[in-house]
């Protein structure tokens, strides 16, 4: 029969905080993997938009593999296949998950960032060149800040999905939320109760991120009225830090 006492215990009374530690691990892996994926995706997007066919071919081949094969298979390839290719090289479980998640996320972020850059009016780049800006300077100062507003909603969805996709790590024995529920529920056959506990933690993490995402979107809203006489930088609009420039 369903045991509500067990759910209550692991939610509020567990002295060892097993699920809270697992939730922290999920958050840490998601933040690091998503950050690395965004950086990798930016470079891949620029490679696809490059004038050099070799860079375009490399980027497209990368996307073809990592978007065309399941993430679970990629994790298992690193976990079980890498030691056979390079004898003696066995990645720890967290390193294997970080590498696999980052490489996979980079492929999807590449398309998101490329679409966001393409959504910026081409006249912005032409005007930047007319002012004497080099390509990379124009991208950093003009194009990418405008593309950031387009990137935030799909980026938020990707990070939300990343928080839940960490459950794949249980297949290699990593004690994230799903793995913790299976480990502590299997001996007493109370897996269902502990999966409910894990679901509550997943919902808390995704809800917190939803609030943060909406806050970032409001900060980047082009129709948001700034304070009169104050010109805020891009970093201050996003993070709220830095000194405003008084006009």
Image: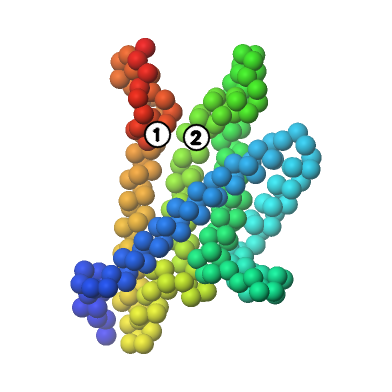
| Residue contact between numbered discs 1 and 2, judged by CB atoms under 8 Å | yes
x and y percentages locating residue 21 in the rendered image = 34, 66
Residue 244 higher or lower than 5, as above or below: above
Quarter of the figure with the N terminus: bottom left
Q: Is residue 66 left or right of residue 61?
A: left
Q: With respect to residue 202, does 142 lie above or below?
A: above
Q: Residue at x 37, y 54 (%)?
A: 206
Q: What kind of colouring is applied to the model shown? A: rainbow
Query: Which mark's residue is nearer the viewer, 1 or 2?
Result: 1
Q: Nearer the viewer, residue 155 or 20?
A: 20
For the image shown, how many numbered marks are present on the structure?
A: 2
Earlier along the polypeptide chain: callout 1 or callout 2?
2
| Residue at image coords 44%, 46% | 156
Image coords of residue 84 (percent x, y): 70, 75
Q: Nearer the viewer, residue 6 or 47?
A: 47
What is the crowding at mark 1: few (fewer than 14 residues within 10 Å), some, or many (at least 20)?
Answer: some
Locate residue 45: give its quadrant: top right
Tell me the residue that label 1 is attached to: 238
Q: Nearer the viewer, residue 118 or 229?
A: 229
The answer to whether residue 189 is seen in the rendering is yes
The percent coordinates of residue 18 (x first, y second) are 32, 71
How far is disc 1 from disc 2 in space, using C-alphas? 10 Å
Residue 111 appears in the rendering: no
- Find disc 2 in the rendering and name its residue: 148
Badge 2 crowding class, 10 Å Cα cut-off, few under 14, some 14 to 19, many 20 or more, is some
Is 4 left or right of 247, judged from the image as shown? left
Q: Secondary structure at mark 1?
A: helix
What residue is drawn where x is 63% and y is 28%?
136
* Label at residue 176: none
């Amino acid at each position: 029969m369903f045991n509500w006492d067990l759910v209550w215990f692991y939610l509020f009374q567990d002295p060892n905080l097993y699920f809270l530690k697992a939730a922290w691990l999920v958050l840490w892996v998601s933040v690091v993997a998503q950050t690395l994926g965004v950086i990798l995706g930016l470079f891949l997007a620029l490679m696809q938009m490059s004038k050099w066919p070799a860079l375009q071919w490399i980027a497209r081949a990368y996307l073809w593999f990592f978007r065309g094969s399941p993430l679970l298979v990629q994790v298992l390839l690193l976990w079980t296949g890498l030691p056979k290719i390079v004898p003696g090289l066995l990645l720890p479980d967290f390193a294997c998950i970080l590498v696999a998640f980052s490489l996979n996320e980079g492929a999807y972020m590449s398309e998101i960032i490329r679409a966001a850059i393409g959504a910026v009016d081409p006249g912005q780049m032409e005007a930047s060149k007319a002012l004497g800006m080099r390509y990379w300077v124009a991208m950093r100062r003009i194009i990418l800040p405008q593309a950031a507003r387009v990137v935030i909603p799909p980026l938020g969805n990707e990070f939300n999905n990343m928080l839940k996709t960490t459950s794949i790590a249980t297949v290699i024995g990593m004690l994230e939320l799903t793995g913790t529920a299976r480990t502590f529920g299997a001996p007493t056959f109370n897996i269902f109760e502990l999966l409910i506990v894990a679901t509550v933690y997943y919902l808390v993490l995704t809800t917190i991120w939803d609030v943060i995402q909406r806050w970032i979107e409001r900060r980047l809203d082009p129709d948001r009225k700034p304070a009169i006489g104050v010109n805020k930088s891009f970093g201050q609009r996003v993070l709220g830090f830095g000194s405003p420039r008084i006009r």
